[in-house]
Image: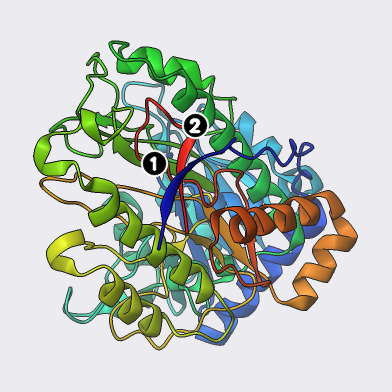
Amino acid sequence: MTRLVRIDWPDHGAPDTPPAFSLAEANGRLAALRKAADARGYDVTVVYGDREHAANIHWLTGFDPRFEEAVLVVTPGDALLIAGNECLAYTAISPLVQAGSVRVGHCSSLSLPSQPRGGRRLKEWLADMLALDETVGVVGWKWFGAAEVDDPATALDVPAFLADPLRKLAARVENATDLMMHPGHGLRARVDAAEIARLEFANHMAAAALKRMVFAFREGMTDFQAVEAARIGGLPLGCHSTFAMGDAPGLCGPSGRHLTRGEPIGFNICHWGANICRAGWVARSEGDLPVAAQDYVEAFVEPYVTAMSEWCSMMRPGVSGGYIWRHMMAALPFEVFAVTLNPGHLIGQDEWMSSPIFEGSTEPLASGMAVQMDVIPGHPVYGSTRMEDGYVIADAALQADLAQRFPNVAKRCQSRARFMRDVIGMDVPDCLLPLADTCGIIAPFLLDPAKVVVC
């Protein structure tokens, strides 16, 4: 059973600025890529990045391409970061570039249209790093299954201006994106204590901004004014902030519409490593809703909160993704809740890295997984509801390391878990670390956000 109660949204304290990405971390990650590539039989690994798909190259180097594309080429004994006009100087942000462990090359073809051209072509830079008898693994941002393409191994997801010369210069070119992003064996699919500290900072910044926005909601204000009230702190955005009201599609951003009592609403603040999202109604109580939707809390929100409590209970090492999928589909029947995407996924710099949770999955959850509680229901009458926040699954060893290196991070996560158990009544296991102060909070009537659902 659940009920509505009036409480203060929790404040577990503001985190300190997280640790900077170190040379030791970068060297370790580059070594891990070389080891994984060697095990796969790749002589050379090529990592592509652009502004929308910067996560893999940033994870390896600390450099993220801005405005343009970039290419990282890694061999057993060398590494070259190729950048365009505007990013060339910015490559110095990488500890590997600063240390001379990664060389830098300039290719103006990676730059924006009509900017100065000339100098070495991309093919010439690539030719320096690979040979005709070699096998190349290419890391983009997705890999493919047998139902999607004729040959998943060689189907690339990078631009033709990179794929074409690689195929001419090497004996074989394969898609190697799974080495970085696969939920089971991807290098980025597990986080350590330093990454937890960074994720917690990002989740705090996004959650604090969303809380400021929600408590500023007033009937008649524009969506621009609402987002302005969030005072987003300046961390890079993982996706555009959404703000959808009424019949607007959920991925819409602010457009100048006014908050109108009796309309459904959904919105998010997303930084690298954090996406805090909520949905409900522009209302103070069920009496403000359309007549057909006035049982919104009982018929829609309460089952969802109960299901999210069950979701938390299953976030333990060894639980299979298929088991979670089955339980979520049973708890939230499709004919009512219409959940179409995976009920939970991994998050990194990219808002959606991959997911071990899907129908038939045998992938087990593991310690070190940064998981987004991203279970998205939708209904033609009730609209939606949402409790979307970030968590990390951490066994005793990882928690001990976190407590030793970042004791305040560990204490805040424990405090959030206690709040979710003792105040909200959710089934949160000891191995699940909530990263945001919004974890556990659902306010169905967003003109009265202090009224939240508890189990």
Q: Quadrant of residue 442?
A: top left
Rate crowding at label 2 as few (under 14), some (14 to 19) or many (20 or more) other CA atoms within 10 Å: many
Rate crowding at label 1 as few (under 14), some (14 to 19) or many (20 or more) other CA atoms within 10 Å: many
In the rendered image, residue 134, in percent from the top left (x then y), is placed at 47, 78
Foreground pick, 7 / 184: 7
In the rendered image, residue 151, in percent from the top left (x then y), is placed at 22, 80
Indicate whether 2 appears above or below 58. Answer: below
Label 1's element? strand
Q: Which residue corresponds to the image point at 21% horizontal and 82% vertical from the top-left?
A: 146
- Left or right placement of residue 115 versus residue 209 in this view: left
Mark positioned earlier in the residue sequence (2 or 1): 2
Label 2's element? helix
Foreground pick, 30 / 223: 223
Residue type, mark 1 in image: Arg
- Left or right placement of residue 47 versus residue 305 in this view: right
Q: How is the image coloured?
A: rainbow
Q: Which residue corresponds to the image point at 54% horizontal and 36% vertical from the top-left?
A: 206
In the rendered image, residue 16, in percent from the top left (x then y), is placed at 79, 37
- Residue bearing the label numbered 1: 278
Q: Residue furthest right?
A: 404
Foreground pick, 409 / 123: 409
- Residue bearing the label numbered 2: 210
Q: Are marks 2 and 1 in contact (CB under 8 Å)?
A: yes
Mark number for residue 336? Answer: none
- Left or right placement of residue 370 versus residue 69 in this view: right
Residue type, mark 2 in image: Leu
